[in-house]
């Protein structure tokens, strides 16, 4: 009897927990889901690009890239980052999202 | 308790099936609430399975022999530590452990990604819950851990003696964590392919789980090797056993994946390759689980023949066909966004390294499944042994280790002559000097490959050391910090990069230990009486005295050995062979104490220079006449008691058992009082300890790469670069 009660309580707790979002009412899927997903992809690509810029800077400072090579690569990477930022702005404009808050000053790499 | 366990398994199965339906309905028709409900089903599943597993553990700890699995895998004399681990020594318990870990890691992954990959996550949830449903189905209908016995025995069979090793506490959970964690990138890859969200986001979201899977599986593999080295009594750590190989396969492809995903993350390249790799890794993880449980290949690590083969084959077939179908279906969306800038770039090194890793995985796969392949083609089952594996894997490992040294020296995008001069000179010189120095050592020419390999390892260690040094100097130049603080600072702020480098260094050291210990190992089998000596690789090993110990759990017969070199004491080694009682009463009242399973405790003197390893195999045949006499005497006594008055029977049996225990102890003492020759295996392995040191360094590096930077620091760094790029953006638009 005790065993049955334990199982019953577990089932009750699961039904309450798992069913909670459904009780709050059916929220339709985001109509701008595709745009939001694109935005998320672009944000991920932007973060990866910043990491690339940072890595190139560290490669330069540890001697793997010469001044000249670093200047060229950094320019390329920044151009790619700018292209990404422009695409992000374009997508944001389509979904009406607010731009991110102003950025802090740049930190040192090492 | 068993009833509650069984009921909770049914509840878990229902929750998993509901979660699959809710996630898919929510993703394609029903809306966000259904998706959230599906995700909560995974959390609920983790909760229910935690309760279920706790019930099983409790049954083991309380020696509740009404559970069939407890009666057949534990006993009252099993130490508490091993009672806790016995749960996963059985087919049934290990299946429950698998699905429990899957539910925990899935919950963590879905919690972490709940605000990201919103389109991909519901499909990934359904895939993860499909795996969970499959394993729950097995535990419900094929191998239930909650099966009870109609007649409850007084005593259990006990845990397999070979599994009584501290590594067994962590080896299976780490392996299963590796396998189940690899299910997460697999599931998200399926989600990304189905929803066509194939850019960097799913990779970024699951990268850490792939790394954690790689780390856990690696730790599990090394713990298994350590168990083999110190418990199995053959002196080796890797035997190319099918089950060992099965765990190595997803680790190799997973290693390739965690490198190549960096290229997709940065350059949007290798999307087909990455999707294929992660799908292959997930499938190989299930294949490994299948091999351990199906009994189709002979292995010391397997659970033996079972009825689980067909369900697993169906699952693996569906995974292979589904994966190939999805990649082909989405091939247009998987087109690369960029091309390789140069064949001399870090991307190219990663690509080559990927090819080598996949080639290694193919060799291991082919060798592992060769018995089945040969049987299918010729009708005769043939197998390949370690020499076959060594023939193909050794050259590939050479190239792989060399690449792990080259990678850190090469910048992304392109390598120039100037950076070759700056980066490669010192490691190159270190490699050449090492090879020449080693070849000057007497005897080294016998194994020139080992000397060359040591040179390659020197190259790797110098390249990693040089990178750390240069990073520290760069930090010192900007922050004016003392060297140790600057080194810690640069590593802390670039954990992924330097964690990876440390992994490379550790892995090179590990393989150096493997290469040298196997190339220059001296093994010798001898039979000695107490007082006699043998000479092994310049060491004098003297059998000082025999030992015996009779406990409720086992009878141990062993030896104390003295190891010396040129008259100087080097080590005292103690080795024993433990004999566990058999449940087979036909072996006799005394005989069954010597007729059960047995295990070895090796004598090991581990050192940075060399390991001296020994194991005893005491021949117990000389004890047979006295055991037979004891069996006859006690059988007569027992018959006498049973034919006597009932009221005295219990007391008389207890007295007889006390006498029996004394007799068993006396029989075991004969090994000490009237010793006869015992067989020993002695092994001297140079640098074997470096295998374990290399593994520890590798996993510390992995942990460093995995450890997230504090969120505030990440935001600060990202914001800094955002500001710089934004300033340029402003300039370009003015």
Image (cartoon, coloured by chain):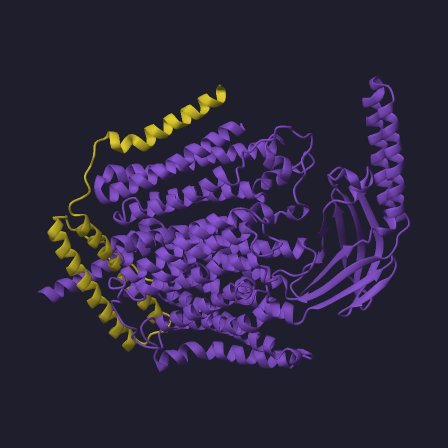
Chain colours: A yellow, B purple
Q: How many marks?
A: 0
Vertical position of residue A35 compared to residue A1: above or below: below
Q: Is residue B268 left or right of residue B143?
A: left
Residue B716 in sight from this viewpoint:
no
**Residue B107, position in %: x, y?**
38, 42
- Where B349 falls versus B24 (above or below)? below
In the picture, measured across the screen, residue A13 lies left or right of residue B513, that is left
Q: Extreme front residue here?
A: B379
Please identify the quadrant where the C terminus of chain B is shown.
Answer: bottom left
The residue at 67%/55% (across/down) is B232
- Judge left or right: residue B726 versus residue B463: left
Q: Position of residue B531 (x, y in %)?
A: 88, 59
Residue B497, given in percent of the width and then of the height, sits at 40, 62
Depth check, front residue: B67 or B406:
B67
Is residue A65 positioned above or below A2 on the image? below
Who is closer to the viewer here, B563 or B28? B28
Residue B358 shows in this picture: yes
Would you identify the image quadrant in which residue B45 lies? top left
Q: Residue at position x 84%, y 51% from top?
A: B621
Residue A31 image position (x, y, % from top left): 15, 45
Residue drawn 64% across and 28% down? B151
* Residue lying farthest to the left in this orientation: B734
Examine the rendered structure and indicate whether residue B5 appears above or below residue B353.
above
Q: Nearer the viewer, residue B345 or B382?
A: B382
């Amino acid at each position: 009897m005790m065993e049955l009660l334990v199982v019953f309580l577990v089932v009750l707790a699961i039904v309450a927990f798992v069913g909670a979002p459904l009780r709050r009412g059916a929220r339709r899927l985001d109509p701008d889901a595709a745009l939001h997903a694109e935005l998320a992809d672009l944000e991920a690509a932007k973060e990866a690009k910043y990491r690339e810029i940072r890595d190139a800077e560290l490669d330069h400072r540890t001697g793997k890239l010469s001044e000249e090579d670093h200047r060229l690569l950094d320019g390329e990477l920044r151009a790619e980052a700018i292209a990404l930022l422009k695409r992000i702005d374009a997508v944001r404009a389509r979904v009406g999202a607010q731009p991110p808050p102003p950025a802090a000053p740049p930190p040192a790499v090492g | 308790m068993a009833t509650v366990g069984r009921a909770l398994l049914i509840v878990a199965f229902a929750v998993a099936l509901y979660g699959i339906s809710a996630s898919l309905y929510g993703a394609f028709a029903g809306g966000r609430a259904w998706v959230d409900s599906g995700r909560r089903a995974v959390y609920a599943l983790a909760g229910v399975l935690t309760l279920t597993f706790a019930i099983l553990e409790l049954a083991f700890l309380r020696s509740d022999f009404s559970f069939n699995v407890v009666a057949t895998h534990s006993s009252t004399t099993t130490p508490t530590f091993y009672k806790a681990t016995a749960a996963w020594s059985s087919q049934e318990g290990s299946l429950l452990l698998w699905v429990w870990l899957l539910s925990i890691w899935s919950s963590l992954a879905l919690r972490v990604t709940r605000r990201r990959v919103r389109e991909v996550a519901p499909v990934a949830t359904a895939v993860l819950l499909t795996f969970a449903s499959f394993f729950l189905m097995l535990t419900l209908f094929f191998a239930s851990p909650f099966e009870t016995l109609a007649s409850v025995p007084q005593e259990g069979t006990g845990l397999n003696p070979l599994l009584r090793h501290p590594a067994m506490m962590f080896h299976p959970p780490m392996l299963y964590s590796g396998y189940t964690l690899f299910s997460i990138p697999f599931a998200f890859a399926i989600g990304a392919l189905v929803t066509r969200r194939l850019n960097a986001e799913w990779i970024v979201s699951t990268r850490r789980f792939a790394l954690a899977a790689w780390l856990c599986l690696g730790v599990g593999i090394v713990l298994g090797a350590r168990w083999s080295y110190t418990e199995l009594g053959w002196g080796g750590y890797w035997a190319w056993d099918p089950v060992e190989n099965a765990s190595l396969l997803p680790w190799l492809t997973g290693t390739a994946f965690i490198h190549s995903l960096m290229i997709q993350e940065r350059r949007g390249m290798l999307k087909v390759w990455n999707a294929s790799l992660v799908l292959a890794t997930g499938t190989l993880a299930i294949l490994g689980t299948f091999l351990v449980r199906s009994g189709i290949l002979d292995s010391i690590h397997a659970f033996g023949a079972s009825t689980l083969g067909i369900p697993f084959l169906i699952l693996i077939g569906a995974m292979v066909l589904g994966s190939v179908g999805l990649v082909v279906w989405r091939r247009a969306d998987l087109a690369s966004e960029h091309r390789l800038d140069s064949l001399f770039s870090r991307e190219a090194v990663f690509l080559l390294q990927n090819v080598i890793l996949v080639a290694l995985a193919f060799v291991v796969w082919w060798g592992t499944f060769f018995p089945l392949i040969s049987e299918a083609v010729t009708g005769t089952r043939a197998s390949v042994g370690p020499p076959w594996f060594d023939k193909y894997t050794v050259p590939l490992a050479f190239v792989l280790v060399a690449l792990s040294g080259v990678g850190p020296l090469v910048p992304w995008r392109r390598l120039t002559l100037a950076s070759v001069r700056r980066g490669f000179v010192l490691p190159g010189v270190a490699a050449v000097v090492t090879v020449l120095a080693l070849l000057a050592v007497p005897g080294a020419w016998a194994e020139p490959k080992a000397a060359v390999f040591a040179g390659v390892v020197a190259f790797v260690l110098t390249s990693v050391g040089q990178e750390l040094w240069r990073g520290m100097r760069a930090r010192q130049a900007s922050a004016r910090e003392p060297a140790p603080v600057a080194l810690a600072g640069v590593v802390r702020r670039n954990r992924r990069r330097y964690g990876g480098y440390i992994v490379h260094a550790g892995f090179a050291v590990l393989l150096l230990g493997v290469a040298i210990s196997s190339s220059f190992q001296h093994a010798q089998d001898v039979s000695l009486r107490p007082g006699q000596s043998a000479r092994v690789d310049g060491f004098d090993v003297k059998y000082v005295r025999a030992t015996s110990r009779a406990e409720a759990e086992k009878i141990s017969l062993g030896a104390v050995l003295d190891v010396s070199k040129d008259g100087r004491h080097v080590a005292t080694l103690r080795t024993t062979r433990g004999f566990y009682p058999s449940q087979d009463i036909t072996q006799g009242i005394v005989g069954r104490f010597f007729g059960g399973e047995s295990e070895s405790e090796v004598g090991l003197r581990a050192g940075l220079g060399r390991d001296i390893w020994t194991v005893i195999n005491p021949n117990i045949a000389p004890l047979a006449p006295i055991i037979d006499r004891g069996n006859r005497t006690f059988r007569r006594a027992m018959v006498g008691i049973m034919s006597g008055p009932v009221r005295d029977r219990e007391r008389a049996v207890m007295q007889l058992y006390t006498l029996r225990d004394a007799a068993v102890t006396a029989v075991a003492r004969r090994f000490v009082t009237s010793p006869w020759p015992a067989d020993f295996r002695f092994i001297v392995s140079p640098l074997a300890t470096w295998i374990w040191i290399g593994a520890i360094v590798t996993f510390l590096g992995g942990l460093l790469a995995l450890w997230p930077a504090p969120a505030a620091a990440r935001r600060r760094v990202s914001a800094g670069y955002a500001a710089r790029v934004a300033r340029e953006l402003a300039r370009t638009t003015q």
